Image: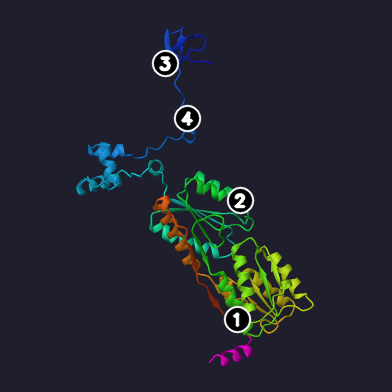
């Protein structure tokens, strides 16, 4: 029902064409043409107005200079006087100017963004590495995108695709347990995106790597057990496809051979690094007819599961069973009498890895030189492996 907005008549209203896209009406009672006003929407349902973001053009208009002058001043171009540059910067601050990083990135073909892919966050190792990486990248003006594969090959492949979509300038990566195919990393390499691997590295790609001396750390750990009187030493290792597993196994066997011990294959077990498998294989070792009197574990979480298992069976540590881990997790110093372990320089590893990726980004492709940085470890001796009587004899013999 249409009501005349002049005389409020209802029955004498008829349509009378359109004006500026709106229906026009004629009231025959008072011979008045009118259109209906557009209803005002409540503020709660008004479409949001797009906020205007200050641009270089706004700064140029305010100062009465050219757009190119403002652009050169903002980027520190040498042909702009210090006075003009300061005036532009002050005006940019007053107008709340924020540079369009996306547009700048497209022009320069760089995003000042690095991606890092890690396999898990359950242990402190990878977060500690990330802290070191971030410290270096932040000082260099780079942002860090952090992704984890959750020990899944498929997720790791998805991570690399996301890195490509985000146009990262470089990638830092540590492989998942399942990774045996490296085509997703080769795809990055083919697109000219530099990659630095750390800890769990890829041997098929001829690029920089940062690792610890896994062989030397394992050797020191097993030799320490031998020096404390342990004679039947087992090794609960990691997945055989990982280089860290291979190197720690090599350190284990080399220490035994140096001291004249035979290698017993039944005392070497490869695990997937989960707590469940550590318990299962630990039980298998301790249920042997002649069980081991010491276990060197591939990492601290595995070693801690062995300590818990030993306690549940009434075994005394270190008298009945010696245990040594690898990585020096924070809990290692507080469980039982303390877990003997091999400490890795995680923060330093992160810093060196970040420095390597920045070096690759800033070098020409033909200057890339494969580089492998090996960091030394430290044996941290605690109560899980020190037999006092044997330790005293050993110390006396070496005075």
Q: Give the x, y percent position of residue 385.
A: 63, 81
Give the structural element (helix, strand or loop) at label 1. helix
How packed is label 1: few (under 14 Cα within 10 Å), some, or many (20 or more)?
many
> Start and end of the magenta stretch?
387-399
Predominant secondary structure, magenta span: helix
The dot on residue 20 is: 3
The dot on residue 41 is: 4
Give the structural element (helix, strand or loop) at label 4. loop
In this figure, which residue is indicated by the disc labeled 1? 224
- Front in this rendered view, residue 76 or 378: 378
In this figure, which residue is indicated by the disc labeled 2? 155
Q: Is residue 305 above or below residue 229?
A: above
The numbered mark, 3 or 4, whose residue comes first in the sequence reads 3
The numbered mark, 1 or 4, whose residue comes first in the sequence reads 4
Mark 3 or mark 1, whichever is nearer to me? 1
Q: Give the x, y percent position of residue 154.
A: 63, 50
């Amino acid at each position: 029902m249409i009501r005349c907005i002049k005389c409020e008549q209802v029955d004498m209203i008829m349509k009378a064409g359109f004006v500026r896209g709106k229906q026009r009406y004629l009231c025959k009672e008072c011979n008045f043409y009118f259109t209906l006003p557009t209803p005002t929407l409540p503020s709660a349902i008004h479409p949001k107005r797009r906020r205007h973001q200050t641009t270089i053009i706004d700064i140029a208009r305010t100062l009465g200079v050219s757009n190119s002058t403002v652009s050169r001043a903002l980027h520190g171009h040498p042909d702009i006087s210090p006075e003009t540059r300061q005036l532009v910067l002050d005006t940019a601050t007053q107008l709340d100017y924020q540079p369009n990083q996306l547009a700048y990135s497209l022009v320069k073909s760089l995003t000042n963004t690095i991606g890092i892919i890690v396999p898990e966050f359950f242990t402190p190792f990878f977060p500690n590495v990330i802290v070191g990486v971030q410290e270096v990248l932040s000082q260099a003006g780079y942002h860090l995108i952090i992704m984890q594969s959750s020990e899944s090959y498929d997720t790791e492949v998805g991570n690399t695709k996301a890195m490509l979509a985000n146009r990262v300038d470089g990638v830092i990566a540590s492989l998942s347990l399942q990774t045996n195919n490296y085509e997703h990393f080769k795809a990055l390499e083919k697109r000219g995106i530099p990659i630095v691997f750390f800890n769990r590295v890829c041997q098929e790609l001829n690029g920089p790597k940062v690792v610890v001396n896994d062989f030397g750390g394992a050797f020191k750990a097993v030799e320490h057990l031998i020096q404390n009187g342990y004679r039947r030493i087992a090794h609960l290792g990691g997945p055989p496809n990982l280089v860290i597993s291979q190197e720690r196994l090599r350190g284990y066997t080399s220490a035994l051979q140096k001291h004249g011990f035979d290698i017993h294959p039944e005392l070497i077990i490869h695990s997937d690094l989960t707590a469940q498998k550590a318990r299962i294989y630990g039980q298998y070792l301790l249920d042997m007819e002649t069980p081991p009197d010491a276990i060197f574990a591939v990492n601290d979480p595995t070693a801690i599961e062995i300590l818990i298992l030993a306690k549940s069976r009434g075994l005394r540590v270190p008298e009945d069973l010696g245990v040594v881990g690898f990585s020096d997790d924070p809990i290692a110093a507080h469980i039982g009498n303390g877990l003997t372990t091999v400490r890795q320089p995680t923060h330093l590893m992160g810093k060196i890895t970040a420095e390597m990726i920045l070096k690759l980004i800033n070098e020409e492709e033909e200057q890339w030189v494969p580089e492998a940085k090996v960091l030394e470890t430290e044996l941290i001796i605690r109560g899980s492996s020190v037999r006092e009587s044997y330790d005293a004899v050993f110390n006396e013999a070496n005075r």
